[in-house]
Image: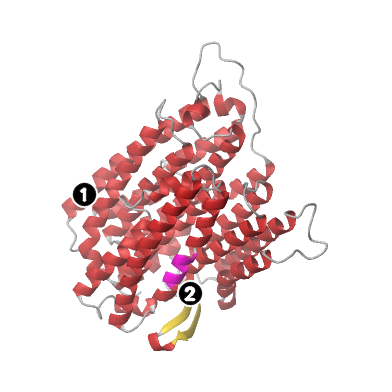
């Protein structure tokens, strides 16, 4: 188990180094690019298999216990350690990260985005995977910061070199926003480590803030929260996200929405809640207020983009929808209750699966039509997707209804549990305020349903026109697309019908986390 977790974190880095080397004789395939793309699929597939093996070996009877731990002294003077481990909170995120990266590598093998050398593309995706996986596996504050930052450079180059229109400004906006937030976050992490005498996240969570004064906790939460809020992204620190998603290649958008946004909310759960509970309690009402503003703002922005004549980009619309969906996650965390935090973790996974699928689908639409402009997709297309590519249209409708929280699919449980958490927040928080936040979030669910149903009506059904020509057929779902998208569809249905798969892992770990390390 220890070896598996270490391999999952380090393996992609070794694969990235190997990707830059010349392909061995006999493995070059039919063209110079085929070998390195196959290498990317092989490495990410091996990491996914290791993650599945880790899940099978995980002690599901004790998900609150840190397992597969490695603890090696690294910088003795600062008590910084190479400390790895997983519990019921981090395991689902680790597996989802490995799955999404493998599906992106598989998709890229058949549909590589236009840009420079495929070697660089594969190497950057593998470095990105290593940073994402490490973020969910490390148990030292400084290692967490290093892993948190490790993803920035590869994502910057994926957007800047393989992206679409306006990719350079979008890439610069992405990295400047996130770097600025990370500098402030580092100050908060250093404050905790220096005041408590350790950077060990397990020891700090067990101490539950008893070794830190309230003023230190408040300052630390403010600093760390800004860095995490930028990555989440929380309104009003979200403005980098729509540009980055619109410009990024398909696989970049999938990983950005599916994993990178979760790194921010995971930091709130793993660091802010257990280590600085008094500071978190001080800021919880403000966090919840920003969260529900983000829910409404994201939904209204999507409605504006979806209306006829707005020239809205479908990728941009889904990016704004992420602002709203991550608002539900933040609301659950702000409630500081087991119900709310479990809902936030469930919504994290559901959003990763559903939005990953939606960005894959929009990428496929853009490949076929040459644009993701909603007016172009909806206008002068006769029967639109249902008539031109029925399987593609059906999948887009499935992704939309899953995203709006249809009962029986994964998106429902996270939103419902986060609102239940807000209905009865933790002791010391204002219940009338959180009831108000819950009501506003409820309005957000209606707005979410409104804009997603508008998108389905316009793109899948088209705009009825007098004497419209018979719609020309476009390529329906291809074999490689079916292979890349089916796992996301299946897991969305599984998590919706059997939520205990996830909640059985997260609930004991959340209970222990909120109780100060006591089971």
Count of numbered circles on the image: 2
Element marked by disc 2? strand
Residue 141 placed where, x, y %? Answer: 39, 74
Q: Residues within 10 Å of mark 1 (few under 14, many from 20)?
A: some
Reading the image, the residue beneath label 1 is: 435
Magenta residues, start to end: 144-150
Magenta span dominant secondary structure: helix
Q: Residues within 10 Å of mark 2 (few under 14, many from 20)?
A: many
Does the magenta run of residues contain 193? no
Does the magenta run of residues contain 148? yes
Query: Can the viewer see residue 297 in this picture?
Result: yes
Q: Nearer the viewer, residue 74 or 397?
A: 74
* Displayed quadrant of residue 278: bottom left
Q: Residue at x 53, y 60 (%)?
A: 154
Q: Is residue 434 above or below residue 386?
A: below
Q: Residue at x 56, y 77 (%)?
A: 2
Q: Is residue 399 above or below residue 131?
A: above
């Amino acid at each position: 188990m220890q070896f598996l977790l270490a391999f999952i974190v380090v393996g992609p880095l070794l694969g990235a180094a190997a990707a830059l080397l010349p392909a061995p004789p006999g493995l070059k395939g039919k063209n110079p690019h085929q070998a390195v793309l196959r290498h990317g699929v092989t490495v990410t597939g091996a990491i996914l298999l290791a993650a599945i093996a880790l899940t099978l070996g995980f002690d599901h009877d004790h998900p609150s216990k840190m397992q597969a731990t490695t603890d090696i002294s690294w910088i003795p003077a600062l008590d910084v350690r190479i400390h790895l481990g997983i519990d019921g909170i981090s395991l689902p995120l680790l597996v989802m990260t490995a799955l999404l990266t493998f599906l992106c590598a598989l998709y890229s093998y058949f549909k590589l985005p236009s840009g420079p050398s495929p070697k660089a593309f594969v190497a950057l995706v593998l470095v990105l995977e290593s940073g994402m996986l490490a973020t969910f596996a490390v148990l030292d504050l400084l290692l967490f910061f290093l892993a948190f930052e490790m993803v920035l450079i590869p994502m910057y180059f994926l957007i800047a070199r393989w992206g679409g229109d306006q990719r350079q400004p979008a890439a610069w906006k992405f990295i400047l926003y996130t770097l600025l937030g990370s500098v402030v976050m580092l100050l908060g992490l250093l404050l905790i480590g220096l005041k408590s005498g350790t950077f060990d996240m397990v020891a700090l969570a067990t101490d539950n803030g008893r070794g830190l004064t309230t003023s230190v906790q408040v300052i630390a939460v403010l600093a760390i929260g800004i860095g995490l809020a930028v990555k989440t992204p929380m309104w009003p620190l979200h403005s980098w996200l729509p540009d980055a998603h619109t410009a990024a290649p398909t696989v970049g958008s999938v990983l950005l929405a599916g994993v990178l946004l979760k790194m921010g909310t995971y930091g709130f759960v793993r660091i802010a809640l257990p280590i600085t509970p008094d500071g978190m309690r001080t800021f919880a009402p403000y966090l919840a207020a920003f969260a529900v503003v983000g829910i409404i703002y994201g939904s209204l922005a999507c409605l504006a983009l979806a209306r006829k004549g707005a020239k809205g980009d479908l990728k941009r619309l889904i990016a704004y929808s992420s602002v709203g969906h991550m608002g539900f996650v933040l609301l659950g965390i702000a409630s500081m209750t087991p119900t709310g935090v479990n809902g936030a973790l469930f919504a994290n996974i559901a959003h990763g699966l559903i939005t990953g699928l939606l960005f894959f689908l929009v990428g496929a639409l853009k490949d076929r039509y040459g644009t993701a402009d909603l007016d172009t997709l909806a206008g002068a297309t006769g029967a639109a997707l249902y008539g031109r590519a029925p399987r593609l249209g059906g999948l887009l409708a499935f992704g939309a209804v899953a995203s709006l929280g249809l009962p029986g699919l994964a998106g429902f449980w996270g939103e419902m549990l986060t609102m239940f958490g807000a209905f009865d927040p933790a002791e010391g928080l204002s219940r009338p305020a959180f009831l108000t936040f819950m009501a506003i979030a409820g309005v957000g669910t209606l707005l979410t349903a409104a804009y997603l149903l508008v998108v389905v009506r316009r793109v899948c059904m088209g705009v009825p026109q007098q004497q419209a020509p018979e719609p020309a057929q476009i390529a329906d779902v291809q074999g490689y697309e079916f292979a890349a998208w089916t796992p996301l569809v299946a897991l969305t249905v599984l998590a919706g019908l059997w939520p205990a798969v996830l909640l059985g892992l997260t609930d004991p770990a959340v209970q222990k986390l909120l109780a100060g390390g006591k089971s």
